[in-house]
Image (tube, grey):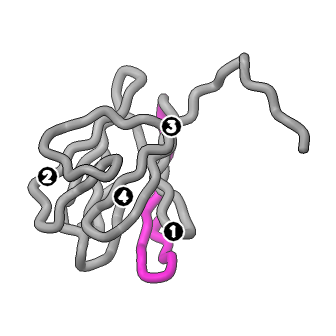
Amino acid sequence: MAKRIESTALRTETTAGLPCWLILDKGRIELAEGENLVGRDPRAKAWIDLLTVSRRHARIVITSGEARLEDLGSKNGTCLRGKRMEGPERLLDRDPILFGSIEATFRLWRARADIDTRTT
């Protein structure tokens, strides 16, 4: 199912196992266990339909309770935590990512019994 958000098109998939998302501008992309292709190719699990994103821009692999990001030789590069990527790197909750000129935030949810909801 494709959904257009402003000039960015997103496709969501059901998450199996570790719940992870990419947050972009006004929407989110759910990531699935295994390989999640990020790119302009409409078959990508994380479809971003903008010219600054390569067809096969990057991939996020979710396995064994962790997520790893790898640039796939994209023309405009992938930056993680403000640095251009040179090899695969582990993703942490709330990591900022740039796919070309597109800003995203990686979210990873882990149930923790020691977290209480605070009142304001």
Quadrant of the frame with the C terminus: top right
Residue picked out by circle 1: 25
Identify which residue is drawn at 42% across, 75% down: 8
Residue 13 visible in this rendered orientation of the protein: no
The answer to whether mark 3 and mark 4 are in CB contact below 8 A is no
Of tags 4 and 2, which is closer to the observer? Answer: 2
Q: Nearer the viewer, residue 81 or 55?
A: 81
Q: Is residue 112 magenta?
A: no
Q: Nearer the viewer, residue 5 or 99?
A: 99
Give the amino acid type for the residue marked by disc 2 in the picture. Leu
Of tags 2 and 1, which is closer to the observer? Answer: 1
Residue 52 to residue 18: above or below: below
Which of disc 1 and disc 2 is earlier in sequence? 1
Crowding around mark 2 (Cα neighbors within 10 Å: few <14, some 14 to 19, many 20+) is: some
Disc number placed over residue 46 in the picture, else none: 4
The answer to whether mark 2 and mark 1 are in CB contact below 8 A is no
Secondary structure under the numbered disc 3 in the rendered image:
strand
Marks 3/1: CA distance? 17 Å
Crowding around mark 4 (Cα neighbors within 10 Å: few <14, some 14 to 19, many 20+) is: many
Give the amino acid type for the residue marked by disc 1 in the picture. Asp
Secondary structure under the numbered disc 2 in the rendered image:
loop
The stretch in magenta equals: 1-17
Marks 3/2: CA distance? 22 Å
Residue picked out by circle 3: 108
